[in-house]
Amino acid sequence: PRSAFDDFAAPNVASRKKEDDMIAARVRSAKAQYAGRRVQNVQRKTANGRARVCQVQAKYGKDSVFLDLDDMDSTTGNWDMYGMDDQKRYPDPQAAFFDRAADGLSRREA
């Protein structure tokens, strides 16, 4: 026996199947693009047919200095810049939350 629901559901089922088929086709095409292929090393050649040679250089500051032991704050960053030494770092509700959350993390006595 047919019900009123069958007339309502039939178009939705067909359109949903069509959407599922479209999604499946997209997934298949995406997987095809990422199929494993051997990577080839391609050497670029100049106009005269020789392989191009370049030297990689990394520089920091002047005179190619990578690490300045005399100025560590500028080299590695000043980590104390944003720190606070006050006991009251957080608003009261947030401090209470942290106290309650860390309460179970304290060491038990043996």
Image: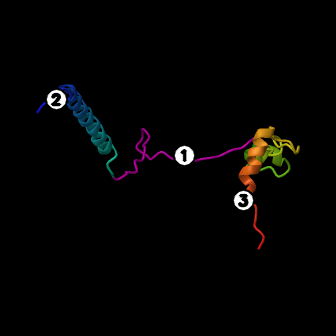
Q: Mark on residue 54?
A: 1
Q: CA distance from mark 1 to mark 2?
A: 76 Å
Q: Which residues are magenta?
A: 38-62
Viewer-proximal residue among 34 and 52: 34
Which residue is label 2 attached to? 3
Which residue is label 3 attached to? 105
Q: Is residue 100 visible?
A: yes
Q: Residues within 10 Å of mark 3 (few under 14, many from 20)?
A: few
From the viewer's perspective, is residue 90 above or below residue 108? Answer: above
Q: Earlier in the sequence, mark 3 or mark 2?
A: 2
Q: Mark on residue 36?
A: none
Q: Is residue 39 magenta?
A: yes
Q: Disc 2 marks which amino acid?
A: Ser
Viewer-proximal residue among 34 and 63: 34
Q: Residue furthest left?
A: 1
Q: Residue at x 21, y 25 (%)?
A: 8
Q: Main secondary structure of the magenta part?
A: loop
Q: Earlier in the sequence, mark 3 or mark 1?
A: 1
From the viewer's perspective, is residue 55 above or below residue 110? Answer: above
Q: Disc 3 marks which amino acid?
A: Leu
x and y percentages locating residue 74 in the rendered image: 80, 43
Viewer-proximal residue among 71 and 109: 109
Quarter occupied by residue 91: top right
Dot 1 lies on which element? Answer: loop
Which one is in front in this view, the residue at disc 3 or the one at disc 2?
2
Viewer-proximal residue among 14 and 76: 14
Q: Is residue 50 magenta?
A: yes
Q: Disc 1 marks which amino acid?
A: Cys
Q: Are marks 3 and 1 in contact (CB under 8 Å)?
A: no
In which quadrant is the C terminus drawn?
bottom right
